[in-house]
């Protein structure tokens, strides 16, 4: 399906930015801006876009928080190898199979947080997407500045326990644009009691 193609493009580009820790801040911001430009082009395409087809002609770009390098956060991924696959709740009756891969432990302004990180078992045999992990989350901006149903981040499976999660790459599920989609609901344990003012904001077509 077309949304899998877009998903694959986003996670590959996003993961490449996460891996470039030596890039200057100027280069880093330019890369994020280019990613957003490329995404807008996809969303403007009547063939590839996840938007309601009736809205594509009115679409002029997605809304984002200002790019903030402070939200490119290094933490530790504590693995949970004994976790069993389970059915992840979604906005519809669809129940995709995930496995909890680990806990991402990190700090924001000296406050400690943890997010559960998941592996999509449907992608295990997919040589492109099986390299990535999935982090659905909500925070104190949800239903205010950002989408109430939460946002997502994808990261490459790290080779060490240290991992960088870039909240500037946080993106909305497709349900934010069109309710025909089926979207994973972030689990309660992934609600952050912090304002993540990075990544994609609410989608308001009328504001564009």
Image (spheres, rainbow, N blue to C red):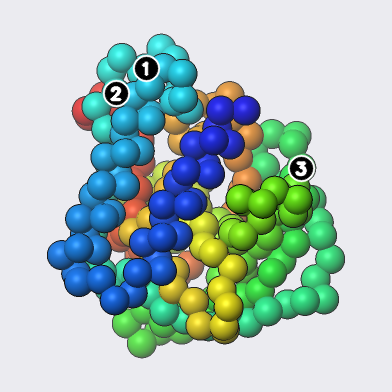
Mark 3 to mark 2 CA distance (whole Å): 31 Å
Q: Is residue 169 left or right of residue 185?
A: left
Crowding near pointer 3: few (<14 within 10 Å), some, many (20+)?
Answer: some
CB atoms at circles 3 and 2 under 8 Å apart?
Answer: no
For disc 2, the neighbor class at 10 Å (few under 14, some 14 to 19, many from 20) is some
Dot 3 falls on a residue whose secondary structure is loop
Residue 108: mark in rendering = none
Q: Position of residue 34 (x, y in %)?
A: 25, 47
Q: Front-most of 154 and 22?
A: 22
Residue under the image location 25 percent in, 71 percent down: 23
The reply to whether callout 1 and callout 2 are in contact (CB within 8 Å) is: yes
Which element carries disc 1, helix, strand or loop?
A: helix
Residue 94, by quadrant, is: top right
Q: CA distance from mark 1 to mark 2?
A: 6 Å
- Point out residue 151 in the picture as x, y percentages from the top left corner: 47, 51
Identify residue for label 3: 95
Q: Earlier in the sequence, mark 3 or mark 2?
A: 2
- Bin the neighbour count of mark 1 within 10 Å (Cα to Cα): few under 14, some 14-19, many 20 and up: some
Instruction: Confirm whether residue 170 shows in the render.
Output: no
Whole-percent x, y for residue 92 in the image: 69, 34
Q: Which image quarter: residue 3?
A: top right
Q: Which residue is mark 1?
A: 55
Quadrant into which the N terminus falls: top right
Residue at left 27%, top 32%?
61
Residue 123 visible here: yes
Q: Is residue 174 above or below residue 135?
A: above
Of callouts 1 and 3, the N-terminal one: 1
Kindly give the residue lying farthest to the bottom in the view shown: 110
As helix, strand or loop, the secondary structure at mark 2 comes to loop
Where 103 sits versus 148, above or below? below
Please give the label number shown on residue 59: 2
Against 41, is 107 above or below? below
């Amino acid at each position: 399906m077309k949304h899998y193609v877009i998903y694959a493009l986003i996670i590959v580009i996003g993961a490449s930015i996460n891996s470039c820790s030596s890039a200057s801040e100027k280069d880093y911001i330019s890369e994020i801006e280019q990613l957003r430009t490329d995404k807008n082009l996809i969303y403007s395409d009547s063939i590839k876009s996840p938007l309601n087809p009736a809205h594509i002609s009115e679409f002029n770009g997605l809304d984002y928080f200002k790019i903030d390098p402070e939200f490119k956060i290094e933490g530790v991924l504590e693995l949970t190898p004994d976790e069993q696959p389970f059915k992840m709740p979604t906005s519809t009756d669809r129940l995709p199979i995930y496995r909890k891969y680990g806990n991402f432990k990190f700090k924001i302004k000296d406050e400690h947080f943890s997010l559960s990180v998941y592996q999509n078992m449907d992608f295990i045999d997919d040589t492109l997407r099986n390299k990535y992990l999935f982090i659905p989350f909500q925070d104190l901006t949800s239903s205010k500045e950002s989408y109430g149903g939460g946002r997502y981040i994808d990261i490459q499976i790290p080779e060490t326990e240290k991992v960088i999660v870039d909240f500037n790459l946080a993106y909305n599920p497709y349900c934010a644009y069109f309710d025909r989609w089926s979207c994973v609901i972030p689990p309660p344990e992934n609600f952050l009691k912090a304002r993540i003012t990075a990544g994609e904001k609410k989608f308001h077509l009328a504001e564009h």
